[in-house]
Amino acid sequence: MIATLPTQLETRGNGKGEPSLAELNEKMDALTRHVEYLTAQAERAERARQDRAELFHDIGPVAQDAFRLATEQLAEVQEYVDLDDLMRLFKRLLQNTVLLERMLDQMASISELADTMMPLSSQAFGKAVDVLQMLEHKGYFTFAQGGMQIADNIVTSFTADDVKKLGDNIVLILNVVKDMTQPEIMHFVQNTLLIAEKQVEQPVDTSMLGLLKQMRDPNVRRGLALTMRVLSVVGAQAKA
């Protein structure tokens, strides 16, 4: 009877509305859990406080130096900068945040494009260097220097009136050059020069008998006839 009394107290209480032993144990466990939770929170808060204290201790000198430097820099420009201007600039930056973000995206895209084009640019630069070396080896640059000297001589040799007349007659000059550079004319001039060069090396008989002997050559008579015809045209032009 006495042995069963604690078991009855554990399950039913003491009959006076007081909690049983199991309920007391549950409350003690809950209280223990709360205490452990509060202890963990207190430890976490203490660690956070120590971390903040260490952070403030580390950044304190840096912040002081930054504040001192900012103060010195602002002291140098305080006569040029107004606080209202800074606030207005800050407001505009806030109002154009989307635009600034878009500009930063574009700059990032340009940077990526530059990274992509860098190898191609290197190849193109190397190709350009090779082409320039080939042109120099062939003498293009020397010819260009000579051409510049020729152009300089032409420019210094012509007056303003000469240049005006040249401009007025440029079409006629080009037509004459075009007629002179026809394939038939160029072949005729080339063959004439080659034959004349060969004939110059041979002795020339300038005696009357030698001249009369040359007149018997049909080619000589044809050349004289053509020469007389040309002289007739030149005379007519001179008379006009």
Image: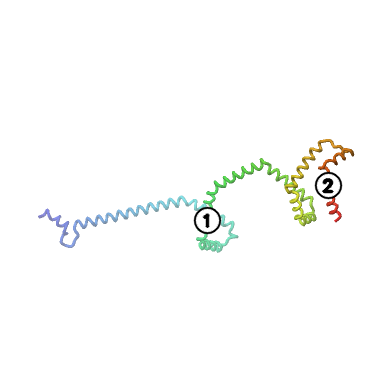
| Image quadrant in which the C terminus is located | bottom right
Residue 225, disc: 2
Q: Earlier in the sequence, mark 2 or mark 1?
A: 1
- For the N terminus, give its image quadrant: bottom left
* Label 2 with label 1: CB-CB less than 8 Å: no
Give amino acid for label 1: Gln
Quadrant housing residue 194: top right
User: Can you give x and y, in whole percent of width and height, for residue 59 in the image?
Assistant: 47, 51
Rendered location of residue 68, percent (x, y): 53, 54
Foreground: 172 or 185?
Answer: 185
Say if 76 sits above or below 149 in the image.
below
Expressed as whole percent of the image width and height from the top left, the position of residue 137 reads 66, 40
**Front: mark 2 or 1:** 2
User: Residue 60 versus residue 84: which sits nearer the camera?
Assistant: 84
Residue positioned 49% across, 51% down in the render? 62
Q: Regarding mark 1 in the picture, which secondary structure is present there? A: helix
Tell me the residue at 54%/49% (across/down).
117
Q: As drawn, is 141 to the left or to the right of 189?
A: left
Residue receiving disc 1: 106
- At 19% from the left and 59% from the top, the residue drawn is 19
The residue nearer to you, when weighing 28 against 135, is 135
Query: How many C-alpha atoms fall within 10 Å of the one at disc 2: few (<14), some, or many (≥20)?
Result: few
